[in-house]
Amino acid sequence: MSTFHRLFKHLCTTAAAGRRAFPPDSLDAIEAAITEGERRHRAEVRLIVEPALGLQEVLAGMPPRERARALFAQYGVWDTEENCGVLVYVNLADHQVEIVADRGVGKIVPASEWQAICRTMTEGFARGDYHNSTLAALTRLNALLQQHYPDDGSTRNQLSDQPMVL
């Protein structure tokens, strides 16, 4: 995709597109899914939706993966006791989902598992189904985290469960 085409997509994808894809009811359901999942595992999950990148980022050719890593750091997803924070990043303009996992959980879970969760979302998004595909992906993510980081009674919520739409 050319820089011009990508720039056009990002300029045309507004905050309103983010609100349409993830209305308050969906955000509430996503928060509840994260909260419920974290009751069964010790990992911390954060979901951030970004309708589009800024002009500077697009012109610099910033890929969604790099942006996800920046948000992972900015929002302290890396700062958990067991190094088991997981960021699910959605970029609507690029039609991309990225998962950035902290080093603890990243060493245990194969990349193919993260990719399968991302595909659950992107395939649903292609059909216009943001709500159900996100919840299905979170169900799969929570099951995976429960397998590797089962709750042992010592968990406490370290990051907000509330999804963010930037």
Image (cartoon, rainbow, N blue to C red):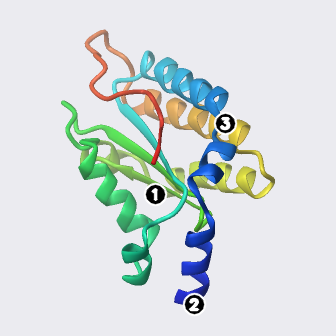
- Name, please, the residue furthest toward the right: 127
Q: What x and y, as percent, mark residue 98?
A: 48, 57
Mark 2 crowd level (few <14, some 14–19, many ≥20, 10 Å Cα): few
Image marks 3 and 1: residues in contact by CB distance under 8 Å: no
Q: Is residue 156 above or below residue 90?
A: above
Closest to the observer, 55 or 45: 55
Image marks 2 and 3: residues in contact by CB distance under 8 Å: no
16 to the left or right of 86: right
Mark 3 crowd level (few <14, some 14–19, many ≥20, 10 Å Cα): some
Residue on which the image places disc 3? 136
User: In whole angstroms, how far apart are the C-alphas of marks 1 and 2?
Assistant: 28 Å
At a point 59% along the width and 59% down the height, the residue shown is 14
Q: What amino acid is labelled 1 in the image?
A: Ala
Residue on which the image places disc 2? 2
Q: What amino acid is labelled 2 in the image?
A: Ser
Q: Earlier in the sequence, mark 3 or mark 1?
A: 1
153 to the left or right of 88: left
At a point 78% along the width and 51% down the height, the residue shown is 128
User: In whole angstroms, how far apart are the C-alphas of marks 2 and 3?
Assistant: 32 Å
40 to the left or right of 96: left
Between marks 1 and 2 in the image, the one whose residue lies nearer the viewer: 2
At a point 81% along the width and 54% down the height, the residue shown is 127
Q: What amino acid is labelled 3 in the image?
A: Ala
User: In whole angstroms, how far apart are the C-alphas of marks 3 and 1?
Assistant: 18 Å
Between marks 2 and 3 in the image, the one whose residue lies nearer the viewer: 2
Secondary structure of the residue carrying tag 3 is helix
Residue on which the image places disc 1? 111
Q: Quadrant of the N terminus?
A: bottom right
Q: How many tags in the picture? A: 3
Secondary structure of the residue carrying tag 1 is helix
- Name, please, the residue furthest toward the top: 153
At a point 49% along the width and 27% down the height, the residue shown is 34
